[in-house]
Image (cartoon, rainbow, N blue to C red):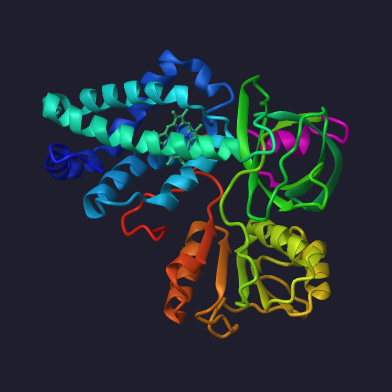
């Protein structure tokens, strides 16, 4: 809880800090990478720095955390913190780096806001930073302790590569050493770390697209992102037999246990990996829940994981798929816009969303209109989660 001394100071200065986040963050990262260039070698993503999404996410989350403390003095924004903690642990971020971020972030705040940062203001924001850092460190410790073994990245051999579509490949991985592997769950992701064309070590998260019965396997489906650092390398340079570094699985969004309520997976584009992972587990468990899989794409030829998804839908007793394919000419699909009410989504449904941000926001609006409770709408933002710290944030 924020101290009585800091509270009014934060109240008074939050608007100023929030208004200057876009100025503070480049200065912060500039200072941090100048002092610690090694943090760009395997920890921070150069691609995210270029497109500006990650700076927005990190700094925005601190302002959002401060807002939460003012509005809900006795609680913590658990979901916000958990999302960050999972991302951090997948990147093997450890507690001893928090003073580094603190030092450069505060130096940037002073540089941008100048005399407005009185000792009193600095002390109040220090308190906010460490409240958030301590909560994250604690959560991250719990996540590391929850692994079968806290091994960080381990080497995995590519056992199989399947060409899903023109721009998507599925990689089946097997351990390349005898480290203990933690079982993956649907909705979780791993970080893959490898060396880019120009020799920089970089990491990127990929959802598990199936959690095989054996924990000794990982399946990830990777879309080639022209502006990315990792996926172009995975698509063009990697072959069966190659070894890459992979983190243990992390991430929220695990399937709820059977409470008799229906499940709906609403995805677009590469977001289908989330459906694929869930259906893969549900099929293995012979789950009898009512399951709806809605997927929007260009045509069947651009849908990744098409066969595994179709097979799971056929095998599951109460599952159906609805395909919304704007350029497909054949039968078995629709070309209009997704309307969740028409498709039978009810207020009791657990809704899972994955796809471009605008798609997820539109689907969330529809689900809320139907009467689905906000906590039953789960979403997965690939890449830095710029939805999370936005005003009117839907996460909490
Ligand atoms: C990602 C917040 C400390 C390294 C993120 C994200 C947020 C965040 C909001 C984006 C999550 C997402 O993608 O959904 C914070 C806060 C911190 C903190 C509030 C301190 C209180 C640290 C520290 C490190 C670190 C100490 C390690 C030096 C990263 C990295 C990413 C990340 C590498 C992934 C984004 C990228 O690759 O550029 N953090 N973080 N963070 N954070 Fe932190």
As for residue 323 lying within the magenta part, the answer is no
Is residue 22 toward the left or the right of residue 362 in the image? left
Residue 148 pos. (x, y %): 69, 38
Query: In the visual, does 358 lie left or right of 277?
Result: left
- Image coordinates of residue 310 in percent, x first then y, are 80, 69
Q: Is residue 224 magenta?
A: yes
Identify the residue at horizontal 38%, vertical 22% (top origin). 99
Residue 358: image x %, image y %? 48, 61
Residue drawn 46% across and 22% down?
Answer: 96
Please report the residue visible at 67 percent of the width from the left and 29 percent of the height from the top: 151
Q: Overall secondary structure of the magenta stretch?
A: loop
Q: Quadrant of the N terminus?
A: top left
Q: Residue at x 64, y 77 (%)?
A: 335
Q: In this rendering, is residue 115 above or below 208?
A: above
Mark yes or no: residue 132 visible. Answer: yes
Look at the picture and state if 172 lies above or below 332.
above
The residue closer to the viewer here, 289 or 164, is 289
* In the foreground, 117 or 215: 215
Q: Which residues are magenta?
A: 222-242
The answer to whether residue 228 is seen in the rendering is: no
Q: What count of labels does the image hold?
A: 0
Relative vertical location of residue 172 with respect to residue 322 in this rendering, above or below = above
Query: In this view of the protein, which residue sits in the foreground, 300 or 61?
Result: 61
x%, y% of residue 159? 87, 39
Image quarter in which the C terminus is found: bottom left
Residue 227 found in image quarter: top right
In the image, is residue 36 above or below residue 162?
A: above
- Which quadrant holds residue 234? top right
- The answer to whether 273 appears left or right of 160 in the picture is left
């Amino acid at each position: 809880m924020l101290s009585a001394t800091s509270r009014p100071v934060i109240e008074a200065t939050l608007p100023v800090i929030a208004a200057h986040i876009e100025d503070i963050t480049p200065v912060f990262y500039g200072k941090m990478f100048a002092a610690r260039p090694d943090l760009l070698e395997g920890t921070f993503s150069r691609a995210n720095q270029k497109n500006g999404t990650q700076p927005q996410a990190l700094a925005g989350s601190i302002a959002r955390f401060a807002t939460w403390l003012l509005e809900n003095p006795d609680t913590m924004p658990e979901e916000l913190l958990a999302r960050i903690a999972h991302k951090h642990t997948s990147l093997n971020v450890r507690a001893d780096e928090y003073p580094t971020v603190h030092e450069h972030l505060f130096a940037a705040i002073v540089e941008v806001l100048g005399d407005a940062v009185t000792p009193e203001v600095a002390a109040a924001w220090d308190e906010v930073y460490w409240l958030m850092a301590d909560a994250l460190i604690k959560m991250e410790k719990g996540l590391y302790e929850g692994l079968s073994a806290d091994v960080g990245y381990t080497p995995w051999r590519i056992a199989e590569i399947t060409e899903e579509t023109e721009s998507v490949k599925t990689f089946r991985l097997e351990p390349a050493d005898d480290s203990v592997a933690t079982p993956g769950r649907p909705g979780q992701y791993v970080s893959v770390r490898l060396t880019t064309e120009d020799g920089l070590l970089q990491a990127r998260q990929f959802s598990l697209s199936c959690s095989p019965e054996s924990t000794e396997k990982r399946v990830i489906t990777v879309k080639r992102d022209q502006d990315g650092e990792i996926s172009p390398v995975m698509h063009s340079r990697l072959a069966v037999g190659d070894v890459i570094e992979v983190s243990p699985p992390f991430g929220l969004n695990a399937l709820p246990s059977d409470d008799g309520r229906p499940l709906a997976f609403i995805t677009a584009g590469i977001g289908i990996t989330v459906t694929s992972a869930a259906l893969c587990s549900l099929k293995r468990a012979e789950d009898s829940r009512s399951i709806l899989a809605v997927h929007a794409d260009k045509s069947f030829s651009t849908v990744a994981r098409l066969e595994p998804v179709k097979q799971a839908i056929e095998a599951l007793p109460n599952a159906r798929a609805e395909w919304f394919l704007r350029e497909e000419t054949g039968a078995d699909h629709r070309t209009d816009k997704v309307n969740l009410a028409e498709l039978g989504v009810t207020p009791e449904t657990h809704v899972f969303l994955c796809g471009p941000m605008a798609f997820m926001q539109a689907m969330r609006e529809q689900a809320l209109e139907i009467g689905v409770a906000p906590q039953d709408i789960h979403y997965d933002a690939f890449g830095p989660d710029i939805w999370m710290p936005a005003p009117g944030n839907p996460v909490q």
